[in-house]
């Protein structure tokens, strides 16, 4: 069994390495650009961002919790009882939304990044009178 | 005489500190660049496996590089790898959360239920490549594709443990540091991942 595991691990590692070496030129080039950007940016910190970070965590967690519970409760457009599979999926979604890790982007920050999307979603859900 | 010697040395350091500091910074930047160059392609592929999207994978890798260089570059270089992968995994999870929220919001909306991430998808992307390929490489690519699909089906922590231990070659302690968990948990996640993957791929492989 251990020998089989070893063979499996060796094969999967070799396949992965092969896929890494087979990366196309465009991807390699973009990775090099990303690396150079990161190294250039290392010297230029943004002090205002630290101030922003100080007050957002509490608000962010609250927003994420409210949003998570709202989503978990289900769509207001469909009131039928959820199946077991749906309930499980909802629970996994809630777990994913509520999880908070060290170094992870704050939930409020996440929502702000997607502000255009939520603006679109709001308009789509509440279409105004036709002009 | 000895006291003069000490003062003299101190004066020299005080008088001309910039070249020494510049040299140290240069050395340290080179080391950081070497580290990132060495790790970036594997990190990209791991992110791609988790996210199924090359552009998203590039974004999270670049973000992880930025966060590492801005916040943790002053840490000992031996800590960079677990720190980088912890940042990367957090980035992957954040992106998956965004997708989950979007997916849930989209189900509320009236009209056709489309995932906005797929709107710009080129229908030709799914057409098989007609270019001639070497059979062996084709088989390897297919085997890797199956492995990727099976990895995506694993719970996130198992996938993470498998990729860090097997693909990145980290030892248990380093993986535990990257995953912010105990070494025992790493062993459990890894063992379950290998078992599940072998069960799924056994017949194919």
Image (cartoon, coloured by chain):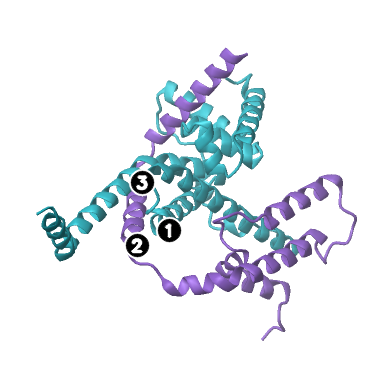
Chain colours: A purple, B cyan
Res. A41 mark: 2
Circles 3 and 1 on the same subunit: yes
Mark 1 surroundings: few (<14), some (14-19) or many (≥20) residues within 10 A? few
Res. A87 mark: none
Q: CA distance from mark 3 to mark 1?
A: 15 Å
Q: CA distance from mark 1 to mark 2?
A: 11 Å
Tell me if residue B139 can be seen: yes
Residue at 66% of width from left, 39% of height from top? B155
| Foreground: disc 1 or disc 2 | 1
Residue wearing tag 3: B36
Residue at 61% of width from left, 42% of height from top? B181
Q: CA distance from mark 2 to mark 3?
A: 14 Å
Is A70 located above or below residue B55 in the figure? below
Q: Identify the subunit bearing mark 1.
A: B
| Dot 3: element | helix
Mark 3 surroundings: few (<14), some (14-19) or many (≥20) residues within 10 A? many
Residue wearing tag 1: B71
Q: x%, y% of residue B66?
A: 41, 57
Residue B44 appears in which quarter of the rendering?
A: top left
Residue at 58% of width from left, 70% of height from top? A112
Q: Identify the subunit bearing mark 3.
A: B
Counting the numbered discs, the total is 3
| Dot 1: element | helix
Circles 2 and 3 on the same subunit: no
Q: Earlier in the sequence, mark 3 or mark 1?
A: 3
| Dot 2: element | helix
Q: x%, y% of residue B121?
A: 53, 53
Q: x%, y% of residue A36?
A: 31, 55
Task: Pick the quarter of the image with the N terminus of chain A.
Answer: top right
Q: Identify the subunit bearing mark 2.
A: A
């Amino acid at each position: 069994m251990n020998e089989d595991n070893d063979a499996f691990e060796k094969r999967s590692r070799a396949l992965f390495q092969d896929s890494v070496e087979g990366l196309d030129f465009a991807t390699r080039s973009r990775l090099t650009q990303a690396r150079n950007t990161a190294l250039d940016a290392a010297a230029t910190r943004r002090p205002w961002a630290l101030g922003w970070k100080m007050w957002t965590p509490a608000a962010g967690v609250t927003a994420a919790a409210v949003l998570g519970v709202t989503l978990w409760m289900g769509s207001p457009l469909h009131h039928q009882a959820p199946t077991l599979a749906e309930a499980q999926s909802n629970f996994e979604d809630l777990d994913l939304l509520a999880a908070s890790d060290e170094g992870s982007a704050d939930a409020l920050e996440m929502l702000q990044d997607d502000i255009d999307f939520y603006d679109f979603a709001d308009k789509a859900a509440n279409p105004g009178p036709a002009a | 005489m000895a006291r003069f010697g000490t003062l003299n040395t101190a004066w020299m350091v005080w008088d001309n500190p910039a070249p020494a500091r510049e040299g140290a910074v240069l050395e340290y930047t080179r080391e950081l660049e070497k580290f990132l160059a060495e790790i970036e392609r594997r990190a990209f592929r791991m992110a791609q496996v988790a996210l199924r999207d090359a552009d998203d994978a590039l974004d999270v890798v670049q973000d992880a590089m930025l966060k590492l260089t801005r916040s943790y570059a002053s840490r000992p270089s031996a800590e960079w790898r677990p720190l980088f992968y912890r940042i990367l995994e957090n980035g992957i999870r954040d992106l998956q959360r965004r997708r989950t929220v979007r997916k849930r919001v989209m189900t509320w909306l009236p009209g056709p239920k489309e995932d906005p991430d797929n709107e710009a998808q080129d229908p030709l992307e799914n057409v098989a490549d007609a270019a001639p390929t070497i059979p062996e490489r084709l088989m390897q690519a297919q085997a890797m594709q199956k492995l990727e699909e099976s990895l995506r089906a694993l719970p996130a922590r198992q996938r993470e443990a498998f990729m860090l231990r097997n693909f990145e070659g980290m030892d248990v302690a380093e993986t535990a540091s990257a995953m912010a968990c105990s070494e025992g948990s790493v062993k459990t996640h890894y063992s379950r991942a290998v078992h599940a993957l072998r069960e799924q791929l056994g017949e194919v492989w």
